[in-house]
Image (tube, rainbow, N blue to C red):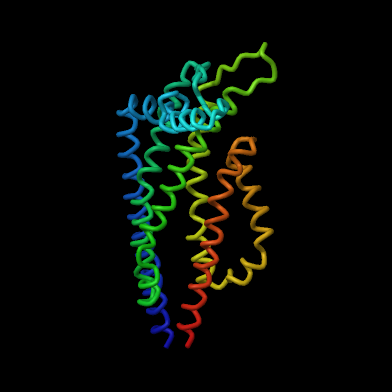
């Protein structure tokens, strides 16, 4: 009897280590994807910086041109943004090189995000029941889509407005704005990446509802509290101006309402599974 239990424990131990080894493989492949894409971004320095990272501060950027067109149509000159590009300076000897490396890594992570999700999904999928696999079909696509949508929303809307507000804000005409390269890069990349992550709200709600930690009734009852939390979260991931906070808060609240429907559907599926 003791010998059988020992054999059973040994098999469970081997199973655990085999799963750990499998996870290691997924992590290594994800890291390699990020590394290779980061190298590509490092090599394509001119494209990444001149046409992507630094573009939102330039008058030719699509969002800036759209706002200026809208300003002309409505005869509201204040809507025309970033017509005087902020001056970016570097004040550290190795500042530009370090920024180049950091930005390359961030680009690698953002571009590789769908692949990273796919690797983790391949690791988790075998442990799911057939019904759970069916219900989770398209999870990688939906999660990737929401992340990319958040990144694009922030890059094409929040970033230009942020640069216009903070870059042109003055406490006095006697103080000129010369923005440090690291400050500019940190603001643009972190706001963009953070917005991509918070757009994953429906996915988080799905899994919390799946394990029974969240219900549609609870979400409906606490709409006001959720609204306050969304405003607070918007204030954290955006610069200190009301306009940017509202622009982030509106889609987040829409996603919250969509999440209620998702939670309701998950609850119905759980009840059917129990029957």
The mark tally for this picture is: 0
Please state the horizontal and vertical placement of residue 175, each as a whole percent of the image.
65, 14
Spot the residue most to the top. Answer: 174
Most foreground residue, 46 or 230: 230
Please tell me which residue is depicted at 39% across the width and 53% down the height of the picture.
Answer: 144
Please state the horizontal and vertical placement of residue 103, each as a whole percent of the image.
42, 32
Please tell me which residue is depicted at 59% across the width and 48% down the height of the picture.
Answer: 249
Please state the horizontal and vertical placement of residue 39, each as a whole percent of the image.
32, 34
Please tell me which residue is depicted at 43% across the width and 53% down the height of the picture.
Answer: 146
Please state the horizontal and vertical placement of residue 223, each as a whole percent of the image.
65, 62
Please tell me which residue is depicted at 52% across the width and 27% down the height of the picture.
Answer: 80
Q: Residue 4 is drawn in which quadrant?
A: bottom left
Q: Answer left or right for 237 relative to 48.
A: right
Q: Residue 218 is drawn in which quadrant?
A: bottom right
Q: Residue 241 is drawn in which quadrant?
A: top right
The relative height of residue 175 versus residue 103 in the rendered view (above or below) is: above
Most foreground residue, 176 or 207: 176
Most foreground residue, 92 or 139: 139
The relative height of residue 12 versus residue 188 in the rendered view (above or below) is: below
Quarter of the N terminus within the rendering: bottom left
């Amino acid at each position: 009897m003791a010998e059988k239990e020992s054999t059973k424990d040994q098999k469970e131990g081997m199973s655990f280590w085999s799963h750990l080894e499998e996870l290691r493989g997924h992590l290594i492949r994800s890291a390699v994807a990020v590394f290779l894409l980061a190298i590509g971004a490092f090599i394509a320095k001119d494209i990444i910086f001149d046409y992507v990272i630094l573009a939102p501060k330039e008058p030719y950027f699509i969002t800036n041109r759209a706002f200026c067109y809208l300003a002309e149509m409505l005869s509201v000159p204040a809507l025309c943004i970033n017509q005087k590009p902020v001056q970016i300076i570097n004040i550290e000897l190795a500042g530009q090189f370090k920024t180049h490396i950091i930005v390359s890594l961030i680009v690698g992570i953002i571009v590789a995000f769908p692949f990273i999700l796919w690797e983790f999904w391949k690791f988790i999928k075998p442990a799911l029941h057939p019904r759970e696999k069916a219900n989770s079909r398209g999870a990688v696509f939906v999660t990737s889509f929401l992340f990319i949508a958040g990144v694009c929303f922030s890059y094409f809307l929040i970033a230009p407005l942020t640069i216009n507000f903070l870059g042109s804000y003055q406490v006095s005409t006697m103080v000129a704005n010369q923005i440090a390269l690291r400050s500019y890069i940190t603001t643009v990349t972190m706001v963009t990446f953070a917005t991509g992550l918070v757009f994953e709200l429906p996915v988080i709600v799905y899994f919390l509802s799946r394990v029974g930690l969240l219900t549609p009734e609870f979400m409906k009852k606490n709409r006001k509290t959720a609204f306050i939390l969304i405003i607070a979260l918007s204030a954290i991931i955006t610069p200190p101006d009301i306009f940017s906070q509202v622009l982030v808060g509106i889609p987040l609240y829409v996603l919250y309402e969509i999440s209620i429907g998702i939670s309701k559907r998950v609850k119905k599926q759980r009840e059917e599974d129990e029957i």
